[in-house]
Amino acid sequence: MTASALSKMKGFSYICLGLISTLLASCIEDMSSSVEQTAIEFSIESTESKVTSGQDNGSSLSLHWEVDDIIHVNGHDSEPLTEGGSPNATFFFQTSLASPFNAIYPASAAGSTTEGNTEIILPTIQKFNKGSFDRNSCILLGKGDEAGIRLKHAMAYIAFVIEKGDIDASLISLQITSVAGEKLSGRFTTDH
């Protein structure tokens, strides 16, 4: 081959590479635009709950969303929350969700959902969190037809204040049982 022919082939190769790059970029762009996303704003109903974590407003603390919180709606987990510090937050889902919206927080507490009934899972073991509580045991539920849902606490909370006093010992665990044998943890069904 002559130098002129090689030069023409080289130019043709660059044009082909340019076209292939353009086609790939447009395919990637088309694929990303075809993914539907749902955004739903959630707010926590009670800012007067006595056993919640967040901003102290006198005799109680208000519950605030935290970065990386995940909520479960209609069988799908949201993307982790990127901003916290407020009782209101917008969660994004990488799918199209249809109303009515049945929400459970945290997503780890979500069981199955059938015919409007939702199963929640309350952990048997809760971790100590100084000045607050185990967020995995703070189960919030909400239901709505619009993309602005107020979540309510699914249960009451018990706070224990244990003072060291004169005893030089550490508390390793605390076990609670109900008088009548009712379940305090495990799987529960709600129609919230």
Image (cartoon, helix red, strand yellow):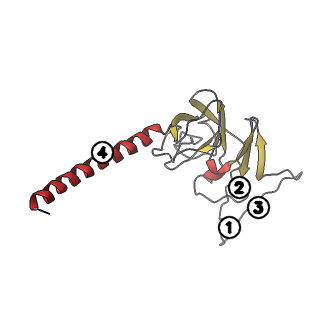
What's the distance in space between the residues labelled 1 and 3, CA to CA? 11 Å
Residue hosting label 3:
175
- CA gap between label 3 and label 2 equals 13 Å
Q: Nearer the viewer, mark 1 or mark 3?
A: 3
Q: CA distance from mark 4 to mark 1?
A: 64 Å
The residue tagged 1 is 171
Question: SS class of the residue under badge 3?
Answer: loop
Residue nearer the viewer, 53 or 57: 53
**Residue occupying the point 14% across, 57% down:** 5
Q: Are marks 1 and 2 in contact (CB under 8 Å)?
A: no
Q: Earlier in the sequence, mark 4 or mark 2?
A: 4
Residue bearing the label numbered 4? 22
Q: Residue at x 82, y 51 (%)?
A: 183
User: How far across and down, in percent of the image, does residue 90 sit?
Assistant: 50, 37
Amino acid tagged 2? Pro
Amino acid marked by disc 1:
Leu
Say which residue label 2 marks: 123
Name the outermost residue toward the front.
1
Estimate the spatial distance between the alpha carbons at disc 3 and disc 4, rounded to whole Å.
64 Å
Kindly check if marks 4 and 2 are in contact, taking CB atoms under 8 A apart as contact: no
**Mark 2: which secondary structure?**
loop
